[in-house]
Amino acid sequence: MNRSKVLIVEDCDDAREVLSDFLKKDYEIEAVRDAESALDRIAKTFYDVVIVDLGLPGMDGHRFCTYVRATDSGEKIVIIIHSGRIEIEEKLMGFSLGADDYAPKPCDPRELRARIDRQLQKRSVEVTSARRFQAGPFSGDLAKQSMSYQLDGSSVEIRL
C-alpha cells in the first residue's frame, strides 16, 4: 500500500525533528526549514499533505500557502498550518489563503496525525465522487472506464 507523502515546513529544528520522527511511522516524511526549499520540493514531487509553520524565515507561511495553491497540483494538496500564532485573524487569514486546517502549537502529535488522517479521508471522498461526471446527455465513469449517452429514451454504454 502506498503511504501518503507529507512535507513538513518548520524552521525550528527540534519541532521539525519531533514531528518527523512521530509521523514517519504512518507516512512518508520529508522535512525542510524554509518555504523556498519546500516550493522547490513541491515542484519536483507531489505531496498529499504539507504541514507549514507561519513564522518561517524569508517567505512566511501565509505567502507560502498562496504559492502552493497556484501550482499545478496545488488544489490537490492538503495544507495544514501548524503555528503558535493562535489569534483568530491569523487563522482566518490562513483559511482565506487556502489552508485546509489549522493546528495551533503546542499540539500533541497524535492530534496532528488525526487531523492529517481526517483531511486525507475527505480528499479521498472528493476524488471518488469526481470519478463520475455528467455533460448534457453524456455521462462517464472513470472507475468503470465507460461512457454512456441517452438515445431515444434509452441509455447506450460504451466501454473505453
Image (cartoon, helix red, strand yellow):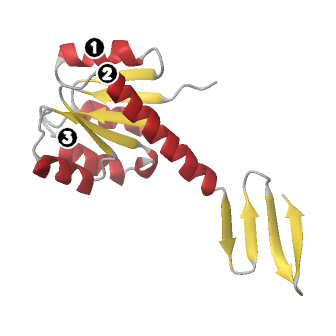
- Whole-number angstrom distance, CA of label 2 to CA of label 3: 20 Å
Q: Residue 18 carries which label?
A: 1
Secondary structure beneath dot 2 equals: helix
Secondary structure beneath dot 1 equals: helix
Q: Are marks 1 and 3 in contact (CB under 8 Å)?
A: no
Splitting the image into 4 quarters, where does residue 119 fall?
top left
Look at label 2 and name its amino acid. Pro
Residue 65 located left or right of residue 133: left
Q: Are marks 2 and 1 in contact (CB under 8 Å)?
A: yes
Q: Nearer the viewer, residue 105 or 55?
A: 105
Rendered location of residue 154, percent (x, y): 90, 80
Q: Nearer the viewer, residue 115 or 96?
A: 115
- Whole-number angstrom distance, CA of label 2 to CA of label 1: 8 Å
Q: Residue at x 83, y 80 (%)?
A: 150
- Whole-number angstrom distance, CA of label 1 to CA of label 3: 20 Å
Above or below, 152 against 70 in this view is: below
Rendered location of residue 9, percent (x, y): 27, 29
Q: Which residue is drawn at 39% across and 19% down?
A: 23
Q: Classify mark 2: residues with Cα within 10 Å, few (<14), some (14-19) or many (20+).
A: some
Q: Residue 61 carries which label?
A: 3
Which of label 2 and label 1 is nearer to you?
A: 2
Rendered location of residue 125, percent (x, y): 56, 48
Residue 77 located left or right of residue 102: right
Q: Mark 2 points at which residue?
A: 109
Above or below, 138 against 147 in this view is: below
